[in-house]
């Protein structure tokens, strides 16, 4: 049975319920989720942030799958993870992670390890758009 049930780069809205359904399993006693959303501010922005524009390397989906496998490691569980690309407005989900394991500590650990590795190792870039039209590119993972 595949441990990484979803590892997807998507140009459409992320479906949290589909991620929960993907990891549903009778062996799981803990399900942990993380949803990263576009916020209206950034420490580097001079004004209000109105959008983020994400772009991904063609290998990003393969990389995401590998990062999910690495985060899961030896834990007995399941992962569903997606990252959005394209233009996202404030409040839109940019990243969804759902992890199911037998015990809560493992689920939290896997989820935390995965989002941290996405931020540093996933070849996805974002351009931050401010209300006055100012834009700024952010590096790998943002």
Image: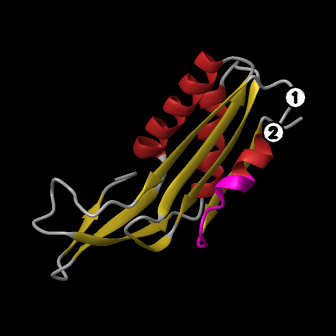
**Residue 107 screen position, x and y as percent:** 62, 25
Residue hosting label 1:
26
Q: Is residue 118 above or below residue 101?
A: below
Tell me the crowding category of disc 1: few under 14, some 14 to 19, or many 20 or more residues within 10 angstroms, Cα based: few
Q: Which quadrant: the N terminus? A: top right
Left or right of 66 on screen, residue 57? left
Q: Where is residue 24, by image quadrant?
A: top right
Q: Is residue 48 above or below residue 107?
A: below
Q: Is residue 15 above or below residue 47?
A: above
**Residue 51 screen position, x and y as percent:** 34, 72
Q: Residue at coordinates 76% horizontally, 21% vertically from top-left?
A: 76
- Disc number at residue 130? none
Tell me the crowding category of disc 2: few under 14, some 14 to 19, or many 20 or more residues within 10 angstroms, Cα based: some
Secondary structure mainly formed by the magenta segment: loop
Tell which of 55 and 89 is nearer to you. Answer: 89
- Disc number at residue 24? 2
Q: Is residue 74 above or below residue 12?
A: above
Residue 135 is inside the magenta segment: no
**Magenta segment:** 11-18
Report the number of numbered marks: 2
**Residue 47 screen position, x and y as percent:** 13, 69
Q: Residue at coordinates 65% horizontally, 51% vertically from top-left?
A: 62
């Amino acid at each position: 049975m595949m441990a990484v049930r979803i590892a997807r780069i998507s140009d459409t809205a992320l479906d949290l319920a589909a991620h929960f359904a993907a990891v549903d399993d009778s062996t799981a006693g803990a399900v942990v989720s993380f949803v990263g959303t576009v916020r209206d501010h950034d420490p580097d922005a001079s004004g209000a942030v109105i959008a983020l524009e994400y772009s991904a390397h063609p290998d990003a989906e393969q990389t995401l799958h590998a990062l999910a496998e690495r985060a899961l490691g030896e834990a007995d569980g399941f992962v569903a993870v997606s990252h959005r690309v394209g233009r996202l407005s404030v409040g839109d989900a940019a990243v969804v992670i759902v992890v199911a394991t037998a015990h809560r500590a493992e689920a939290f650990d896997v989820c935390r390890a995965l989002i941290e590795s996405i931020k540093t190792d996933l070849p996805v870039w974002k351009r931050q758009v401010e209300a006055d039209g100012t834009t700024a590119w952010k590096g790998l993972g943002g």
